[in-house]
Image: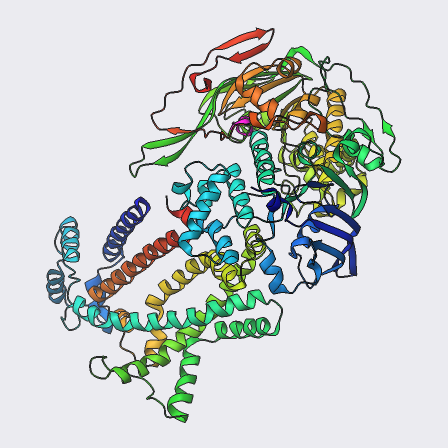
Amino acid sequence: MSIAETTSKPGLSISGLNISFRNKDGWTSVVRNLGFDIAPGETVAIVGESGSGKSVTALSVLGLLPQQATRIEGSIRLGDKELLSLSPKDLKALRGNEIAMIFQEPMTSLNPTMCIGEQIAESIIAHRGISKAEAKLEAIRLMEKVHIPSAARRYGEYPHQFSGGMRQRVMIAIALACKPALLIADEPTTALDVTIQAQVLNLIKELQEEEGMAVLFITHDMGVVAEVADRMVVMYRGDVVEEGTTTEIFANARHPYTKALLSAVPQLGSMSGSNDPQPFAIYDINTGLATDAAVLKSTVDMSEILLEVKDLSVRFPVQQTIFGKVTARVHAVENVSLTLARGETLAIVGESGSGKSTTGKLVTGLLHPTAGKVEICGKPMRSDTRQSLSRSVQMIFQDPFSSLNPRLTVGRAITEPLRIHKLATETQRDEIAASLLTRVGLSPNIAKRYPHEFSGGQRQRICVARTLALKPSVIIADEAVSALDVSVKAQVVNLLLELQQEMQLGFIFISHDMAVVERISHRVAVMYLGEIVEIGPRAAIFSNPVHPYTRRLIEAVPVPDPSRRRDRHKITDSEIRSPVRAGDYVVPTRTYREVSPGHLVQEVGPEWAA
Amino acid sequence: MFWFLRRGFASLIMLWVIVTLVFMSIHFVPGDPVELLLSQDGGSADPATVQMIREDLGLNRPIVEQYVEKLKGLASFDLGRSMVDDSSVSAEIARRLPRTLELIGLAALISLIIGIPAGIYAALHTGRSFDRVASYLAGFAQGIPVFVLGTLLILVFSQMLKLTSAGGFVAFSQAPGKHMLLLLMPSFSIGIGLAAIVFRITRASTLEVLPLDYVRTARAKGLGDRRIVLHHILRNALIPVITIFALQIGSLLGGTVLVEYVFNWPGLSGMLVSGVNARDYPTVTGVILVISALFIGLNFLVDVLYGLTDPRVRK
């Protein structure tokens, strides 16, 4: 690649951009007076939480907002071309050609009925006017370029045969098909596992260096920003609140909102030297003043074991012959043993397919194990005891939008468990709902309202209130804060910690987010392909990870510090393997080694040799 | 290819279950079928005649033997002989079935040609005048009974415009032009209602596909509208259309009675009705078996179509 070719690409320049959406009462302004430039080869990140207008900005550059319902004013220029005054035909010629975009959801962003290769090739054909056969060769070359193994063979496969990470690579291949001058990446790694996220970020960087394109990166993740962006624009409810180089803003944020955002970012390694969880410091967005987090007293009472799981396994048949012989199984959970003491938080971490959510469902009795046993407060869970024991184990789910019935009022949703177990009269239930709502920091008056009136954070508080209704001793939080904005995430984590202080609850905190886990747990179990590969006190796991998988997981977490960017060459292209095994698969006998008191590591199998 | 064979195997099992059910229904219905047959004039049946007909039909033999006999007959496409005129049921079905099939076939074609493009166009322009008028017409077309529409067509095209005769049938081999002309009106009478259903499903499922992420991806690629609609929207939107359409066609197999009656079209449904009226068991079971077999065949075809449109089904 010659220097001339690199510098010939135009940059993006946005100024005075105002965007409004039409609704039934007139026009609502969603982006106000936005302006920034991206030079060729440069990466600018727009950072903000939901409703900040960052994705709307990205779509407006491509002209993808609904025309009748949107009003756009200002200027968006690519080189010397004004994009806002282009005709629909010119805009079409520009999209996918000079400006390309990658979206957040690789699972749904590809057409399920068209083969992968064709989806790449059609973009090439549309803009470069070459023959189908040539386009196919070019598509295979692109698939190789984004490191899709055996590209030629996989050309004819369909999206459902690709993992999330591989689909995002396909999306990147589509985006790069015509060597665009500008690549817009809208939360491209949010839906991916952390080791895959590192690979995809790495790939985007690598391709940017080769092609010399400008990159507009939309994200809410400060770790990702620190990792990739040269400069950043912080948006809050449609306004730019701060703009500057990434190093400058991370070192010396001026606006209170930026400070609040940065302080809410959990930082791996910030907890060394402490054994107990620690709440986040909460910044006031208006004043920028921090409310110092209270120092917590230890809640763990080792003398009372709330939960004991022994040799738990669950397998699902996925493929059978006509005669019912199982030829393939998912080994979702394999020989898992755990204990949870009163007042303790045990985090289960792992990536997709590790069996962490399945373990949570087994413990609550939502799924029945193939083998092994679950004891709650010393009582074994059987079919006759499941109903009564399930009272003491409650669950909070990941998505606060789909885990509340839209037709039930908040009050009814919260007291539903009481009704199912016939524990309180109608009037008592109203009182309980009011007191629980107060307890989770909401007004008791909202009991009569419906879930759609509330934000994600408020809904998650409602879900927490619902789990508390039965006065459980164990709460399983399955990715309970993963879908929330950073500042809201910090508040909900703090709420959970407060509740633990008050009621000595035991938490099983299932998460893929290592930084949050470090903040709130006493002990950590690392799961990989259904098995626990390492378990022990949090401090020991994070300061001395022994198993290669634990190390890989911790290394892959983006560090929210631009001065400590990772060496990109260390990242491998390995995929997360699948827990689907042949029908006659014999589970290897695993042995564990005690590294330090309570810190157990699975003897590393031959599959980790490389 | 494995999914294909598996579905084919399942279809055969289903066919066998239906044969058995139909066989049993004759034997486990309360009352003797022969006595029922002969007692239609009100008087009680003559025992000697009953005995004779029972022997004739093989009803006096052990049930297992009868069942085996029945399966053997089916294997050589022998459905028995009519009790009314002793003609071969298979031969009569073979004569009438193609007529019903071409009626349904043309109706299906008409409905797809109208329904799918109109459905997509309406979904792409929701709330505009075309969408509103078409949705209104579809509601109307779905509500109008087939015999009303049929009679109306006869009134306009045969009585007033004198373009064709009011009904009847001429074999294709004798007069191809006349045959097609006579086929047109009954097909339209069924096709219009079907088109309304196809229109509604296509419109609804296109509206569901439109806001999906992969359609946005296609737009972001800068593809032309035609390609986006044909390759990205239509193919995915067609999956529910196939399901509903196959069910509708299936129910038409036995449901063309009214049209065949109005237009005096000698098809399979007419045969079923007259068979039931005459309590002609061999004819009734024969027609039911053929309709069931066609229904199963149709479902198999739909499964294959599914596999072709949606790669996720091919397991």
The image shows residue A171 at horizontal and vertical percentages of 54, 45
**Of the pair A601 and B15, the residue shown nearer to us:** A601
Q: Residue at x 40, y 77 (%)?
A: B189
Using residue A148 as the reference point, say whether residue A406 is left or right of it: right
The image shows residue A469 at horizontal and vertical percentages of 70, 31
Q: Residue at x 34, y 87 (%)?
A: B166
Using residue B142 as the reference point, say whether residue A425 is left or right of it: right
Q: Is residue B196 above or below residue A392?
A: below
Q: Is residue A323 above or below residue A552?
A: below
Q: Is residue A473 visible?
A: no
Q: Is residue A399 visible?
A: yes
**Of the pair A604 and A417, the residue shown nearer to us:** A604
Q: Quadrant of residue B133?
A: bottom right
Q: Residue at x 73, y 38 (%)?
A: A231
Chain part drawn in magenta: A354-359
Principal secondary structure, stretch drawn in magenta: helix
Q: Is residue A481 above or below residue A590?
A: below
